[in-house]
Image (cartoon, coloured by chain):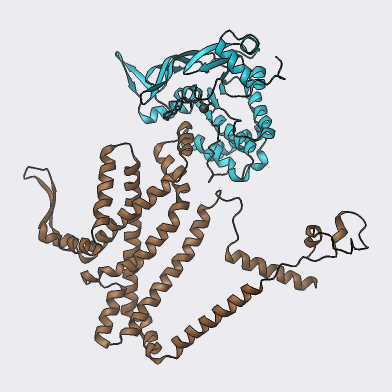
Chain colours: A brown, B cyan
Amino acid sequence: MSSTATRALLPPGAQGPPPAAADAVPRYSQYHLVGSRHPWRWAGTALVALLVIGVAWSLITNPRWEWAVVGQWFTAQSVLHGLGETLRLTAISGILGFVLGFLLALMRLSGSPLLVAVSWTFSWIFRSTPLLVQMLLWYNLGYLYEKVSVGIPFTDVRFFEVPTTTLISQFAAAVLGLTLNQAAYSAEIIRGGILSVDQGQLEAAAALGIPAWRRSTGIVLPQAMRAILPTAFNEIIGLVKGTSIVYVLAYSELFYTVQVIYNRTQQVLPLLLVATLWYVVITSVLSVFQYYIERYYAKGAVRTLPLTPLQKARKYLSTHAAGKVTR
Amino acid sequence: MSRPAQTRGLVEITDVRKSFGTVEVLHGITLTVQPGEVTVIVGPSGSGKSTLLRTINHLEKVDGGFIAIDGSLIGYRGKGTKLHELPEREILKQRTEIGMVFQNFNLFPHFTALENVTEAPVVAQGRSRTEARKLGLELLDRVGLKDRANAYPRQLSGGQQQRVAIARALALEPKVLLFDEPTSALDPELVNEVLDVMRELTESGTTLLIVTHEMAFARDVADRVIFMDQGRIVEQGTPQELFSNPQEERTRAFLSKILEPAFNI
Ligand SMILES: Nc1ncnc2c1ncn2[C@@H]1O[C@H](COP(=O)(O)OP(=O)(O)OP(=O)(O)O)[C@@H](O)[C@H]1O
Ligand SMILES: [Mg+2]
């Protein structure tokens, strides 16, 4: 490692500079940099490792977890179908919820008192009623309003008319309920993010003649993202598990599917474990996404981006490989 | 100062009034700036210098009076006996002819230096990316930052950031450039690199309106110095006239406070 020679600027030892030192720069060339050691860190690591081994051991050896049953159902057709439905619900209501939430946030921050009031009322209603109730209301909309139609008000002219029950399927009720609820929460998250961006940014953009839509989406939103993302991912991860609430509509997503199975087979714990493991997998994958997306939006906000774990590993491997060659 | 005669960039400010709430902060400002003229505005804090600059590109709406650049009203259109505020799109178009440089730079931190410069030409003027890029690199070169084109603002010093901000304002090829205390947020040793860039601009024939506390610079480059106090223009003249022989008591008081004794005119 040749770079250590120039970087080594240790204070001179008590015995003075080494005899070989001729000029100022290579004076310390025979010193080697040694990082400080952390004995307590090692002690802590050992302790935690012991705990983890203990828990893992009990999970593996306790026969009541019935790992064979877990393995049997983990990739069963019906479970995978349920998993697919969970992902579909999460993706659709997550995306629609955040898009609607963005619009609601813009309305809330607009100059129009009407838009502000509408946005506020929306968030107020959907945040103050239980999701379960909203879901059931949507599903039973046909009871309240038999038909949905588009026409001219106060006349008999109808362009289009359908019975509500054919319009609101289980899926539609689930998506509606989850989306509207999600929109109410994400509106506040996005609004908070937008408020965290310096007012001068909007002013500078306006002074440059940049159109309003671009000011929002190109200048303010990317900067707001840094504040929005951690909470938004919290919401999405909550939504993954929150979708399980649609079991009230007998909608066969992951959790409902697992319940149906254990009601039949009576293998409650292992099947709950199957669902749990899948939720863990989804959350883990999302966390990796979160890491990289946050990193993307950090550009320009920090002077230098820290290395990703992959880059660190690569660097570690390459320096160690190089070290072997020179030694 | 002799400069080539300019045809664009005539700024006419007529009896402009502006209130915030019930407090009137501009009490009828009238000022005509000739094309290519360099005007420096000085005055105590709170005298309305920033507000005046911001009314010129309609960042603040006026409550009375008119502002016109090359004969066309800013922000309004005459119709019969009434003035109607222009739709946002038209105002944005007018703003592309007026560049503004802010005290705290206001660069877009998530864009590189070059992206900061090319943003407005692309999205506000509809130029092609390659064309904007070429222009952007030229402008960064002009402010001495070509090699930092891909740096983000936070990776630049204050002086460099302000020079990028100047390049960004120049990218729209404005008729008029407004500077609101461009060096006030800078460490003293960085002030000159920005003033040097601005000095170079005074030769370019763009109309410049500069709010600054850099009196030596004002004396050097200004065609005219305006002294404002409490929302009014108190006195104006060439730097010679205003600094060496102020007529008004308020001007004298201000100058004696701001000019150090060693500063001999
Ligand atoms: N958005 C606003 N709302 C209310 N009052 C304002 C607003 N902007 C400016 N003012 C007031 O208007 C007056 C003029 O302010 P302005 O910023 O134009 O002064 P200035 O001459 O630029 O001062 P400085 O040298 O400190 O920048 C001040 O009294 C200020 O408090
Ligand atoms: Mg000011």
Query: Is any part of residue A14 visible from this angle?
Result: yes
Residue A76, quarter of the rendered image: bottom left
Whether A67 is drawn above or below B265: the answer is below
Q: Is residue B204 left or right of residue A54?
A: right
Q: Is residue B11 left or right of residue B217?
A: left
Q: Position of residue A257 (x, y in %)?
A: 28, 77
Q: Nearer the viewer, residue B69 or B25?
A: B25
Which residue is at a point 10% across and 61% down the rendered structure image? A143
Q: Position of residue B239 (x, y in %)?
A: 63, 13
Residue A72, quarter of the rendered image: bottom left
The tally of labels here is: 0
Query: Is any part of residue A75 visible from this angle?
Result: no
Q: Is residue A24 left or right of residue A229?
A: right
Whether B126 is drawn above or below A87: the answer is above
Q: Nearer the viewer, residue A61 or B127?
A: A61
The image quadrant where one finds the N terminus of chain B is top right
Which residue is at a point 37% across and 80% down the rendered structure image? A274
Q: Nearer the viewer, residue A321 or A235?
A: A235
Q: Position of residue A122 (x, y in %)?
A: 25, 50
Which residue is at a point 56% across and 9% down the rendered structure image? B248
The image quadrant where one finds the C terminus of chain B is top right
Whether A79 is drawn above or below B133: the answer is below
Q: Is residue B199 left or right of residue A210?
A: right
Whether B92 is drawn above or below A305: the answer is above
Q: Position of residue A94 (x, y in %)?
A: 34, 59
Which residue is at a point 30% across and 84% down the rendered structure image? A268
